[in-house]
Image: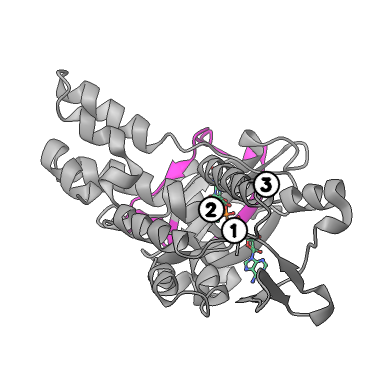
Amino acid sequence: MVASAFIRRGFGDEFLERLVGPLVDGCIVGDVNQVSLSFVYPELQRLYDEDSNLMTKAVKVLNIINRFEPAAFRWGMATLPGVLGKRLGLAVRTHTTVESIERCPEGGFLVRTESASDSVICDAVVLATPAWTSAQLISNLSTELTTRLINLPYTSLATVNLSYRKDAFKTPFPQKGLFLTRDMGNKALSIIPTSLLFRKRAPKGEILLTAFCGGDAHPEVMECDDAVLATNVQSILEKTCGISEEPQFVSVSRINQMIPQFNVGHGETINEIEDAINDIPGIYLTGGYFRGPSLSSSIDHATDVVRKAIENLKAHVACGQRLV
Ligand SMILES: Cc1cc2nc3c(=O)[nH]c(=O)nc-3n(C[C@H](O)[C@H](O)[C@H](O)COP(=O)(O)OP(=O)(O)OC[C@H]3O[C@@H](n4cnc5c(N)ncnc54)[C@H](O)[C@@H]3O)c2cc1C
C-alpha cells in the first residue's frame, strides 16, 4: 500500500499534506504518494490495530516518519573509503572507476578499470555501487539481474549550504530542521541546522544551514543556476526566521540520480534481485537500495553481504574448489 493512502484514511488530507508529506520529502527525499508503506514504515501498519486515541496515534506517526538519524563525516562520505585505504594499504584502490566485470575463461572475474594496469582478477566481487551502475557493470553476466537493477528508480538532489551570523536569526532555527510543504518550499524540501547537529562545521558566531532541494517534486533544480537556488532558500529563511541579511558563505552542489526511491513494489523487486544474484555465484550486491534510506541500514546490509561472501569463499577453499 502507498504511504499516503494509509495516512489519508486514518488521519485525513490536511495531516497528510501539511505534516506527513513534508517529513517524507525532507527525511528520505521520497514522494509520499508513491512510497511503499510496508517497506519504509512497516511499524505504521501496526498502529491501525492499536487501542489508543487519534492524537496519540498521530504523534506516533510523526515520530516514526521523523526517526531519520542525521549522520555525516566532517570531511564527507569519502572519509570512510579513505580510512579503509590507509589501513589496508595497496589492497585498496581509491579514485578508481570500474568499467565492467567479466567472467574469466579460467574461472573468477576480471574487474576492468579505466586504466588496464589497475584491472584485477578475483574469485568474488561485492558491488556497492548504485543499482543503475551495478546494472551496467554486470550487464554481460545476467540480463535478468541487469533489467531489475536498471528499473529501480533514483532521484536527484541539490544541496545549498549557507552560513549566517547567529544574530541574523530573529527566530531560533528549529533544532530538528525545517520541513517544507510543497507550496511553500519554493524548490526546497527541508533545511537542517548542520552546525548545530555536527561539530566544527561553521566559524564561531555563525550557524551553517543545509537546504535540500529537488527530488522528484522539483526535478528542475538540477538545471537551475546556483544563484537562483540560493536566493530561493534565502527567501524561505527570511519568511521563517526573519533573516534579512546576506549569508557569510554560500555553496551549492548537486547529486545526480543518487537517492534510491522506495516506491510501492520495491520489496518485491528486491526479492527478485536477490533470487537473480543467487544464479551468479561469486557476485554479491549491496547498497542503500536494499534495506532503506539510512546510512546505518546500508552498513548493516553491506556487513551481512560481506560475511556471506567470506563464508562462501572459505567453504570452497576448504574443499579445494574455486567459487566460479
Ligand atoms: C545529501 C545526502 C545527505 C544524507 N544524509 C544522511 C544522514 O544524515 N543520515 C543517514 O543515515 N543517511 C543519509 N544519507 C543517505 C546515505 O548517504 C546513504 O544511505 C548511503 O550513503 C548509501 O550508501 P551506498 O554505499 O549505498 O551508496 P553511496 O554512499 O552513494 O556509495 C556508492 C559509491 O560507489 C562509487 N561508484 C559509483 N560508480 C562507480 C564505479 N563505476 N567504479 C567505482 N566506484 C563507483 C561512488 O563513487 C560512491 O562512493 C544522505 C544522502 C545524501 C545524498
* Residue drawn 26% across the image and 34% down it: 44
The residues bearing labels 1 and 2 have C-alpha atoms spaced at a distance of 27 Å
Residue 58, quarter of the rendered image: top left
Mark 1, ligand 1, within 8 Å: the answer is yes
Residue on which the image places disc 2: 211
* 121 displayed left or right of 8: right
73 or 266: nearer the eye?
266
Instruction: Please tell me which residue lies in front, 14 or 79.
Output: 79
Which residue lies at the image location 60% right of the left edge and 43% below the top edge? Answer: 307
Residue 179 colored in magenta in the image? yes
Mark 3–mark 2 distance (CA, rounded to whole Å): 53 Å
Image quarter of the C terminus = bottom right
Residue 238 appears anywhere in the view:
no
What segment carries the magenta color?
A: 159-188
Q: Amino acid at mark 3?
A: Ala
User: Which residue is denoted by mark 1 in the rendering?
Assistant: 128
Question: What sort of colour scheme is used for the picture?
Answer: one colour
Residue 42: percent from left, percent from top: 29, 38
In this view, 50 is above or below 76: above
Mark 3, residue position: 318
Q: CA distance from mark 3 to mark 1?
A: 27 Å
Element type at mark 3 = helix
Disc 1 secondary structure class: loop
User: Counting residues from the N terminus, which is met first, the one under dot 3 or under dot 2?
Assistant: 2
Q: Nearer the viewer, residue 229 or 24?
A: 24
The residue positioned 58% from the left and 61% from the top of the image is 282
Report if the CB atoms under discs 1 and 2 are less than 8 Å apart.
no
Q: State which mark lies toward you, 3 or 2.
A: 3
Task: Point out the frontmost of discs 1 and 2.
Answer: 1
Label 2 amino acid? Ala
Quick check: marks 3 and 1 in contact, CB under 8 Å? no
